[in-house]
Image: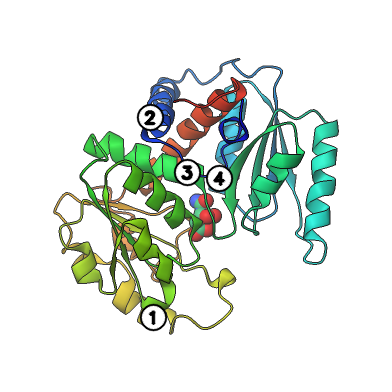
Amino acid sequence: MDHQRRHLLGVEGLAPPAISGFLDLAESYVLLNRSGQTQRDLLRGHTLINLFFEDSTRTRTSFELAGKRLGADVLNMSVATSSVNKGETLLDTAATLNAMQCDLLVVRHDQSGAPSLLAQKVDAAVINAGDGTHEHPTQALLDALTIRRRKGRLEGLTVAICGDILHSRVARSNLHLLTTMGSRVRVVGPPTLIPAEVARLGVTVFHDMAAGLAGADIVMMLRLQRERMTAGLVPSAREYFRFFGLDAAKLAHARPDALVMHPGPMNRGVEIDSAIADDPARSVIREQVEMGVAVRMAVLDTLARGGRNR
Ligand code: NCD
């Protein structure tokens, strides 16, 4: 089996049948989870290690839950990042993991490309749980599952991804997935937070929320990632909210049945107004978390069986 199929390092390069395969399998896990049949022994005897070099709440716990629901032995390793010998630490860690005979390795790292490097050094199937500003494939899959379940399709929908595109691995994975599946994708944000190369990825760029949200089926908000900013790219939080924060007035430009999404963690009052985030008629933010467990079960199941859905 080739390297690309054994691991899940990104959405870029996944063909539509592979994406649909993950979503279809995840769909069956949503139903099982909802019916209360959460204990399965599909991964009995398999070891899953969560290796997180960066903070996480949702992603780590949902991979843990997904692994446990499939019957795997799950270990959580939180590693403080050493800024001096990151490369060395990573390769040392790889050797340790190989010695532990780990089958599935879930990696989050602040350096883009770290999971790919590990994948070359470990025997386990590697799943990228977010690397720097590069990709976060299971987030894009869970977003797609949430949209597909609510709207019945991905093709032909207008999706506006708003805010800090520059630092967002969530945006990058979603751009690849949604354009591959035939959605019309827009990115909306201040020029300082939209990378120049994004226009080449088949998306339309807007610097104004009213125009960017006009007629949108899906409004996906992103967190302002101040921890990744080396320069002052935005003015004050209050000014950012005024121009780019999602409130009722800005949402009124989208379709009346438009859904609001956010990968979390949210900065309430910065990129999204609490009233919108908590409005069950518009916000599917909690449903995204539920879909996260099902999608991760589907990914673990598929990779543990030694292949991708095609
Ligand atoms: C995102 C991440 O870590 O990339 N969070 C998540 O996984 N749900 C987005 C973020 O940190 O803003």
Q: Residue at x 64, y 59 (%)?
A: 110
Please identify, in this view, whether the residue under mark 3 or under mark 1 is nearer the observer.
Answer: 3
Within 10 Å of the Cα at label 4, are there few (<14), some (14-19), or many (20+) other Cα atoms? many
Q: Which mark is residue 11?
A: 3
Q: Which residue is mark 2?
A: 17
Say which quadrant the N terminus sits in: top right
Q: Which residue is mark 4?
A: 59
Vertical placement of residue 224 versus 303, above or below: below
Circle 2: residue type: Pro
The secondary element bearing badge 2 is classed as helix
The secondary element bearing badge 1 is classed as helix
Q: Residue at x 38, y 70 (%)?
A: 269
Vertical placement of residue 306 versus 91, above or below: above
Position of 86 with respect to 239 (left or right) is right
Circle 3: residue type: Val
Which of the colour schemes (rainbow, by chain, secondary structure, one colour) is used? rainbow
Circle 4: residue type: Thr
Tell me: is circle 2 under 8 Å from ligand 1: no
Q: Are marks 3 and 1 in contact (CB under 8 Å)?
A: no
For marks 3 and 1, the one nearer the N-term is 3
The secondary element bearing badge 3 is classed as loop
Say which quadrant the C terminus sits in: top left
Q: Nearer the viewer, residue 82 or 33?
A: 82
Q: Residue at x 60, y 35 (%)?
A: 7
Cα distance in 3D space between marks 1 and 4: 29 Å
Q: Which residue is mark 1?
A: 238
Tell me: is circle 4 under 8 Å from ligand 1: yes
Please identify, in this view, whether the residue under mark 4 or under mark 3 is nearer the observer.
Answer: 3
Cα distance in 3D space between marks 2 and 4: 25 Å
